[in-house]
Image (cartoon, helix red, strand yellow):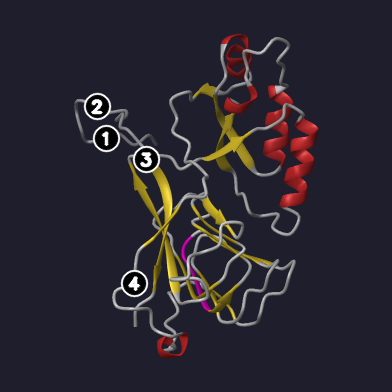
């Protein structure tokens, strides 16, 4: 039996605006086989990292107007679906390339704003001076529903907390990687990689009792160890959050206070 709305003016449907969190795939090659191999290698230890996530195929860096430019959209779509990504739109396509993309079922997302992944950082001066690690050790309050890891993570190990926070009770060694869709709490030294807000959560944060990371990232904005942290936070209890402004997005690193 059909169910009919009690609203007499629009008995069948309403049309409203909606927000959709999407992943952007910034292509650097038109070789779909190379893309497939790279995704297989990257997702080898976390095959469930993507779960039918909608994706924008970004061709901005490939120059689609260049003479002889060609990309096999049906094959690229097949490759992405094989890795649990759902391609919905294309960005940076023009002319015949855009026409081919539309024929493959993609919509034009030329106006989509892609969050920049740039190693920008701002460090706020501590006030008062940062407290030594020992003074900050307190009973651990584990966020409800968080994934908890109570053993040190060695080089090559990767942990992914899908759809929740991640709490690590021991050291994250160089070469290890911790990933979370929410916040990351490390009640020890962070010397590996920490990626919070992996699916675009710009409110996510990273906390560590000793901040010495190889890489820190929130919602795609990252900083690597090639740019050493200032002395105010290096090796100290600190937190990382994302700050958006007129000049773009940047990571904000501040000392933790007792």
Q: Is residue 132 above or below residue 143?
A: below
Q: Secondary structure at mark 1?
A: loop
* Residue identifier under label 1: 5
The residues tagged by marks 1 and 3 sit, at their Cα atoms, a distance apart of 46 Å
Which residue is pictured at 70% across the width and 15% down the height?
69
Q: Position of residue 216 (x, y in %)?
A: 54, 60
Magenta highlight: main SS: strand
Considering only order in the chain, which callout, 2 or 1, is on the residue closer to the N terminus?
A: 1
Q: Residues within 10 Å of mark 4 (few under 14, many from 20)?
A: some
| Nearer-the-camera pick, 207 or 1 | 207
Which residue is pictured at 73% across the width and 11% down the height?
68
Q: Secondary structure at mark 3?
A: loop
Location of residue 27 by image quarter:
top right
> Quick check: 254 left or right of 198?
left
Camera-nearest label, 1 or 3:
3
* Residue identifier under label 2: 10
| Residue segment shown in magenta | 182-187
> Quick check: 130 left or right of 178?
left
Q: Position of residue 208 (x, y in %)?
A: 49, 74
Q: Residue furthest front?
A: 231
Q: Position of residue 124 (x, y in %)?
A: 35, 63
Residue 43, magenta (yes or no): no
């Amino acid at each position: 039996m059909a169910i009919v709305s009690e609203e007499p003016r629009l008995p069948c449907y309403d049309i409203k605006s909606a927000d959709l969190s999407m992943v952007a795939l910034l292509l650097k090659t038109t070789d779909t086989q190379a893309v497939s191999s790279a995704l297989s290698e990257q997702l080898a230890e976390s095959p469930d990292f993507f779960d039918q996530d909608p994706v924008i195929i970004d061709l901005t860096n490939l120059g689609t107007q260049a003479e002889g430019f060609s990309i096999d959209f049906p094959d690229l779509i097949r490759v992405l679906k094989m890795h649990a990504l759902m391609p919905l739109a294309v960005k940076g396509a023009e002319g015949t390339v855009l026409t081919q993309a539309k024929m493959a079922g993609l919509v034009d997302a030329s106006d989509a704003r892609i969050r920049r992944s740039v190693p920008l950082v701002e460090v706020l001066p501590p006030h008062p001076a940062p407290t030594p690690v020992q003074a900050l050790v307190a009973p651990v309050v584990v966020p409800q529903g968080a994934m908890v890891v109570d053993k040190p993570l060695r080089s090559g190990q990767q942990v992914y907390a899908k759809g929740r926070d991640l709490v690590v009770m021991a050291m994250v060694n160089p070469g290890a990687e911790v990933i979370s869709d929410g916040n990351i709490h490390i009640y020890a030294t962070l010397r590996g990689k920490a990626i919070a807000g992996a699916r675009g959560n710009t409110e996510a944060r990273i906390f560590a009792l000793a901040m010495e990371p190889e890489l820190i990232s929130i919602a795609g904005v990252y900083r690597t160890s090639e740019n050493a942290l200032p002395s105010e936070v290096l090796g100290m209890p600190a937190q990382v959050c994302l700050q958006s402004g007129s000049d773009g997005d940047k990571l904000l690193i501040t000392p933790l206070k007792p």
